[in-house]
Image (tube, rainbow, N blue to C red):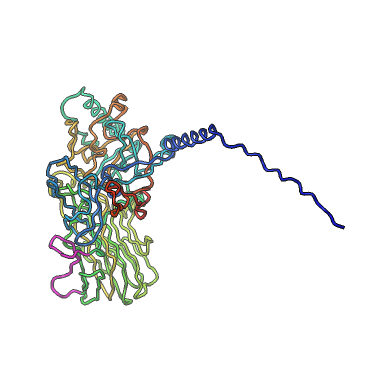
Amino acid sequence: MNATTTALPKHEPHVEPEGVKDTIEAIVVALILAFVFRAFVVEAFVIPTGSMAPTLYGAHGTVSCEDCGTEFGYGLRDLEDTRRHGETTGTSAKAVCPNCNHPNTNLRINDSSKNAESGDRILVLKWPFDFGGPGLDPDRWDVVVFKDPSDGVTNFIKRLVGLPNEALMILDGDVYSARAEDLSDVTLAELERYRHEKYEHRVGSKRGQLRPMSRVVLKELETKLKIRRKAPTAQEALWTTVYNHDFLPQTLDKNQPRWSSRSDGKTGWSNLDQRRLRFEAVRRDGDFVFLDGKSIVASNAYNIRDGYKPPPVSDMRIRMVWTPRDTSAAMMLRLTKLGKTFWASVRADGHLSLFDSQNVPRPDTKKIDVATLEPFTPGEPVMISFENVDYRLSVTVRGREELSSSDDPDSPGYYGPSVAFLRKQTSGRWRQNPPAAITPRIFGIDGAFDITHLIVDRDEYYYRNARVQGLPAAPWGPREGWGSEVTPIFLRGHEFFMLGDNTAASKDARLWDVAGPHLTERGEAFQLGTVPRDQLIGQAFFVYWPSGHRLEWLPIPKIREFGLIPDVGRMRWIR
């Protein structure tokens, strides 16, 4: 018996074609959401200048050093500026290599604006600043976008170094501050008097020079100010490489860096002109090499128009790959700052020591800190770093900190000098003739070992170049600017203080001398040298489009001018 079935008809859902009205509504909603996202969440900005270089680049050129091969960026000269700028005259330019000091003239990108590489394009997180409130304010050392106090329209980007309700002072390149609750009523009243007189001079109700800060108050601040160390991520971003031995200069002129040893011919060091340095003990008292031909100063290769002498920098880091060749291998690394000498001892048996000693430490020399690791294996390379930054010493092995001095200014293990000493050092004759910084040394003590990937870095050093920076619109203001060793600035509950990473070429909070109409109407609620909370836009967090690669082979000249291919390798988080 055959069974037959009747297939039921399929019922397809009825779909109305999307009307023009629905399409328009979807587009409008998408646009509204995009504008809301841009206005309140994340916005893209372009960096126009080099005030934050090398953290962020404005319009610039890029060159690979003709001598050592180091690639670096340099700021472009304004073609309408006919003044002499150091080594830049007329249409020629020299970008001095930050590694080997070679003045490059064969620049891949010239000064013409059409051939310039564009500034970094960044993303800025805005909503925390829009909503405000506890926990949403920016932190010290964040990179922040805000409105230019002089016009309220231009967007500025700097590093935030001063927070509300504190007195701030810049000393020997570092940031110091004291909380309002730690200051006496007398000092708070004097800081308020100084701020009020700034306002009176700004609005023209008072003539003459701004009355100096009371000595009594400066004396109290000397006992209350504390150094404000950089956040670890910011510190890593603010290290500047002074010399990388992987990029050896080829000509080796007298003004170029090199690792040098004793001149008596009895040295245990060899291969100093090669990337792998070798040591084998031949003397009982050890032997050392030192970085010769390199002044460690607060210079920035981005500034091809410098032409002035920057101050020396003592905060530095020496890092390397150390390979012991036998079980008795031992070395010491030496760094100095303001007349004090520090040593890090590393031995193949795993013993590490940190010393504060003017002479080469002996077994009975008092130690700052010690550690015992597993013995190092002969022939096995190990990464080692010794740094002295913000009055804190540390030794890192394989990326882990193993030794350190105290980072608490109130602790007996803290080695930093008094603020009174620093104020004296940063004024008077020292300002005109600063002492030369002593470069790092490596002491071979025993056994045999190799060193590769040897690098010396320096820390950020905030200073003001009096020759090219000043307060022209406020001749009544202090020569030193706001926040100096003689003009500390007090930040009220709504005020922040900003500095540029390229300190010599940054007109930052220290030098602001004009208040725009959007701030003058606030009267005394605005203080020169500060950014009010409501002028903050957001925190910069990512470089999403660095200068792109040009397609030089394209037959259309106009298109060749633009970097169409993204340089993915330079996309980075902003620290």
Q: Is residue 526 above or below residue 571?
A: above
Q: Residue furthest right?
A: 1
State which quarter of the image contains the N terminus.
bottom right
Q: Residue at x 24, y 59 (%)?
A: 70
Q: Quadrant of residue 3?
A: bottom right
* Span highlighted in magenta in the image: 248-267
Q: Give the main secondary structure, helix, strand or loop, of the magenta stretch.
A: loop
Which sits in the foreground, 523 or 186?
523
Q: Residue at x 28, y 26 (%)?
A: 517
Residue 108 colored in magenta in the image: no
Residue 109 visible to an observer of this rendering = yes
Q: Position of residue 549 (x, y in %)?
A: 31, 52
Which sits in the foreground, 37 or 557?
557
Q: Position of residue 304 (x, y in %)?
A: 18, 49
Q: Position of residue 164 (x, y in %)?
A: 35, 36
Q: Quadrant of residue 539?
A: top left
Residue 418 visible to an observer of this rendering = no
